[in-house]
Amino acid sequence: MLNMFTHARRMAGRALVGAAALALAGGGVASAQETIKVGVLHSLSGTMAISETTLKDTVLFMVQEQNAAGGVLGKKLEAVVVDPASNWPLFAEKARELIAKEKVAVVFGCWTSVSRKSVLPVFKELNSILFYPVQYEGEESERNVFYTGAAPNQQAIPAVDYLMENEGVQRWVLAGTDYVYPRTTNKILEAYLKSKGVKSEDIMINYTPFGHSDWQTIVADIKKFGSAGKKTAVVSTINGDANVPFYKELGNQGIKATDIPVVAFSVGEEELAGIDTKPLVGHLAAWNYFQSVDVPENAAFIKKWQAFTKNDKRVTNDPMEATVIGFNMWVKAVEKAGTTDADKVIDALIGVTVPNLSGGFSAMMPNHHITKPVLIGEIKEDGQFDIVEQTPGLIVAEEWSPYLEGSKDLIADWRKPLSCGNFNVKTGKCGGAGQ
Amino acid sequence: MNTKGLAMTRPPALLGTSGIVFLIVLAVVAVLVPVLNLAVTPDSAVHVPTYVVSLLGKYLTYALLALSVDLIWGYVGILSLGQGAFFALGGYAMGMYLMRQIGTRGVYGDPVLPDFMVFLNWKELPWFWYGFDMFPFAALMVLLAPGLLALVFGWFAFRSRVTGVYLSIITQAMTFALLLAFFRNDMGFGGNNGLTDFKDILGFNIQADGTRLVLFVLSAVALGLGYVLCRFLVRSHFGKVLVAIRDAETRVRFTGYRAENYKLVAFVVSAMLAGIAGALYVPQVGIINPSEFSPANSIEIIVWVAVGGRGTLVGAALGAVLVNYAKTYFTSGILAPYWLFMLGGLFVAVTLFLPKGIVGTYYDWREKRRPHDDIPGAPIAAPGPAE
Amino acid sequence: MTSRARLFRFARLLCALALLCAAAPFGRAAAQDAGAPDISAPLAQLTTNKYDDTEAALGALALSGSPAAAGIVTALAEGKLVFGGTPPRLFIQGEAGALLDPLTLQPVAEAPAVKPVRVNNRVRRAIDAANGALSLVSPDAGKRREAALAVGRSRDEAALPALEAALAKESDPKVKSAMNLARASILIGKEGITPAERIAAVELVGAEGNQDALAILRSVPDSAAPEVKQAAADAIAGIERNLALWGMAQNVWYGLSLGSVLLLAAIGLAITFGVMGVINMAHGEMVMLGAYTTFVVQEVIRTSYPGLFDVSLLIAIPLAFVFTGLIGVLIERTVIRFLYGRALETLLATWGISLILQQAIRTIFGPTNREVGAPSWMSGSFEIGQLAITSGRLWIIVFSLLVFFALLATLRLTRIGLEMRAVTQNRRMAASMGIRTNWVDAMTFGLGSGIAGMAGVALSQIDNVSPNLGQSYIIDSFLVVVFGGVGNLWGTLVGAMTLGVANKLLEPYAGAVLGKIALLVIVILFIQKRPRGLFALKGRSIEA
């Protein structure tokens, strides 16, 4: 008996040490000295793989390009790819692994807000840098996170303005998945529309569960709402997979863009690649970038990207552009700081300006969000967008929306001496309402 | 405990050999890991980084969860495809406590309302959030919320004699309904973003290494106690009846036992264990969101138990750790694109080649090698082909 | 290519007629020399490439009576209207990219670099209106009627003269009533008409009784006389009462449609799970494989045989059945057959298989959605009374019932069906009667999987074709089978339809999320009441 115990204990002990050693030793140890590691934290399996896989490829592409151009600080970059499998706690675990075990200098990752929320404490605790490339609800500004996607005022509000001015829309359906992003965006839009004199009875708000696939009733309701004699439009914050059945139902029920246009904030080239777009011609999307942007920088980028992916039909989209901008900003900031040390790079990043792919420049502002042009596109038959409107200048992100009760007094400014993500201008204190 | 029925045989020890080994290994891990984490310098080969500590802590809570499944699946034959719901409820109870602890340190600095309520323009705290600022209340809810759900659900289901796949499917429907409900932002549980950005637990910084180690040790202790409790239950007269129900429910009924009451007690105990696992899990991973209710998660738990060995308790815990370690290991590096193939292949292989799981197969092998003096687990009668 | 040429010829013919019949009301047209009115101003306006100008130019073109107008409008709608050069000139891009003069349709000598004139929704609406005005005089009665409807929808006051001119000449009663309706629709919102005229218009539109009429009636201007407003309000109230009743019927229809989707998703499971007792978690993936088969078929057709697109689904159905059926047989032979009698363990193995299949599809086809198009006969909708029925959904209902009855017939009437039932009821007895039970098992599982594949073909029409497709149906499928009663096909049919209709009747009151939750709770409670489902199998039931 006793013999067996000690044996078992020895075995268990060995297994444990072995496991720990294995965990420590994973990844390329040999090249650790000469390279700078870049973490890629995008789901490659599970429900979010559909969107995030492309961003993983984008980072790999940028790393390859940068290495071809001589790397950073004379060192080659090395991408460390992990798969958080669309599982939110796994995002936190993988983030910790990238930072603590792989010692990456920066992480590009996350798509959904919940994944970002899940990794946030890890980045704060271990003081590393996350570039988040997707449009989101705002209401956040963290020292360790750089948001290269759009805040609601960089996407939703210009789109609504366009519909009001150009299509004379007076009645609004705000349809979304019951996520925090649609909820917040719709709250902001509701307040904005009311400030423009739209009455409550002319706004219909509808939320659907995740992955909703039977849209018959809701589309019929939209049709009914739209028959009140005033021009009606749908502002869609419907997320991911639910879009395809939604658009298919719109087509089936014969709602054309000329009758009730739908402007979407989560539908890009990648999503349209999976839909027969003929019935959708004329429906709109608002982004900060479209593949169809007609400037030489974009044409060159698309060409290289398609060569990299060895697929001449591979599309580009807005979160990709945001990833590219973020990557270039990080490279520039590292070169400016002369080191990959997180604190120095975080400080160096503010004010960094890099070309975007729509022919202009985007700058990292003190609130850790970037300036962006807003483009409104109409869906074309070939699944691309026809850009019908572009804001004349760049728009600065309102990370704290002035249209929301709780955040209207807050600002973020990470420059010293303020260094605060939620500074209350009324009370003059950092930390929200700060009673 | 009434051991009348077992008078013929020598009363089995509370803990079998494997149980003792299991508890010792657990104790060693619980002591060694903190020591290697704190007392050894980071460059040492045997240093355990904090990253590994929180990972192991997570595995231990999964192991406790697997134990709770094994108690009802391995010994009562209830295949619950909704065990994740109890785990998540315990997690939410703990998460609500942790949210209330944030206080004015939320981004909006509201002293009462959690952040997600502020930006959705909620004016006051919903009634079901009352009391969660007190740890004892939250701790009670960790047990009560899953326990009550299991009680109500089980009372209906077992009284109506819903069994087998029917029971499995409605437990799945239950967790799916809860998933949808918690997903709604109007419910007041933070919707899809769930509860996150925790700061303190009982006044200790949740991100401090010390707190992490304490949570880790607590998880190990909980797993150990959970094991002893389950072992105690299944060794007792009560446990014998459970096994009898598993193998021939109708006969047990005819013998005069109220089978539904036995099942109900086991089901509620199991739900509470899952709730405790959830409560320990949340502070260690830092987030709880409705995806914990997803039916796929619950199926995965079943898989852990099957891999380790159904009806062996030790196997369930072992399976949970092994499968999750494999998941951690394969989701990084060059194998990342293929890990689902391996995970899927593992499930198929285990059901085909190790129908009794790792520990069950080991028991079989040991049985063959020497005359038994200690009845290991309760072996599962292999049913014949369907007729 | 030939169709384009035909289109142009037709457009020219149409315009010539437009000139003949419509020249008189348009005084301006007569002033021109060769009978062709001068449209150089709108043409110049089109080259500024501003939406406002394009819209104005379209209005002018529609009323110009120029024979070239229809061709220009059509070219604009198709993105073939281009401009370029200095000063900018307008061209129509003809076959092979040749630039044609918009008036003469002759190729131009030197071709500058050109850009298409931009189109947005507003311009598209103007195009519809212009097209409507232009084809109001088409010789084809169907076209005239469509044009009248289009004008009515656009409610473009500028089209009123053309409409009235066409109305005066119209003899076909159907077209005439459409034109009258269109006229009334325009008049209702028009300033400066008498109350009597407006009331007549209100009554005419009100008699339509549909959603569109409601929209038009609500646009009676505030400045209208009180009696007009009263008439409009009465008409609206009448329509709303009527629509409320139809709304109920519509919900039931939606419910049946949802039910048919559930039936399709569940019916294969009714075989593999209900008849064989395999808790087949890979069932959803079989549906997914069917959907991907459709994608592959369409892809081949798109690249090699574009003419066959409309029958792509008909080709895909048998292929999907055979392909997923074979995969099913393969799974049965390699995995399931070792697990008979261990129902709960089949759950684990098939769950593993489902992970493998998902990842395999993700590796082969990529993680993103794939495009599966709808053939023309499945697009569009029609109305019965106020009941809007979309063709796609109707076909899915028909298809699901066809599959159901075909399966029923197979089990009842064929030899293999007989053998399947025999093996399910008493394996040993069946074996001793000389039935190859192994073979029957493989065939049964293959049949269930093949049916799932066929369901995938139908579901590809309404849902994402992505690796996750199957996951979204698996829970509902199990619920349907369990609710209906394991091992009873009729139970599956009734269960699917009941759940579908109940869901859709709940949805308007409780919302999509709460409706679904309520339904799940109802099913859970129902199972307590009837632990073996709606139609419990009599006698020897599956004891799992």
Image (cartoon, coloured by chain):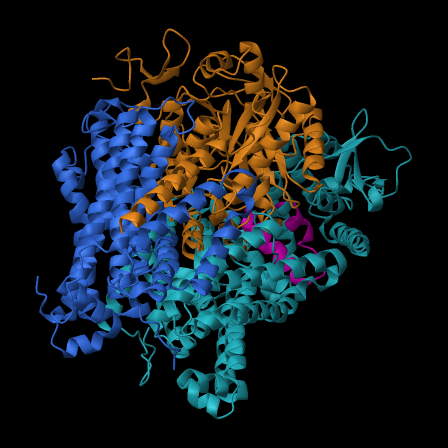
Q: Is residue B90 left or right of A128 when viewed as pictured?
A: left
Residues rendered magenta in the picture: C129-157
Question: For residue C39: magenta?
Answer: no
Name of the residue lying farthest toward the bottom = C433
Image coords of residue A357 (percent x, y):
63, 25
Answer whether residue C376 is visible to the viewer in this image.
yes
Seen in the picture, residue B176 relative to C66 is either above or below; the reply is below
Chain A painted colour: orange
Quadrant in which the C terminus of chain C is drawn: bottom left
- When asked about the image quadrant of residue A205, the answer is top left
What residue do we see at 62% from left, 52% from top?
C364
For chain B, the rendered hue is blue
- Quadrant of the rendered structure where residue B78 is? bottom left
Between A45 and C483, the residue placed more toward the observer is A45
Q: Position of residue B369 (x, y in %)?
A: 36, 64
Residue B149 in view of the camera: no
Spot the residue most to the top: A417
Residue C264 at what x, y percent from top left?
48, 68
Q: Colour of chain C?
A: cyan
Q: In the shown orientation, is residue C87 left or right of residue C400?
A: right
C138 is within the stretch colored magenta = yes
Residue positioned 48% across, 73% down in the render: C337
Main SS of the magenta part reads helix
Q: Nearer the viewer, residue B92 or A106?
A: A106
The residue drawn where x is 84% and y is 30% is: C112
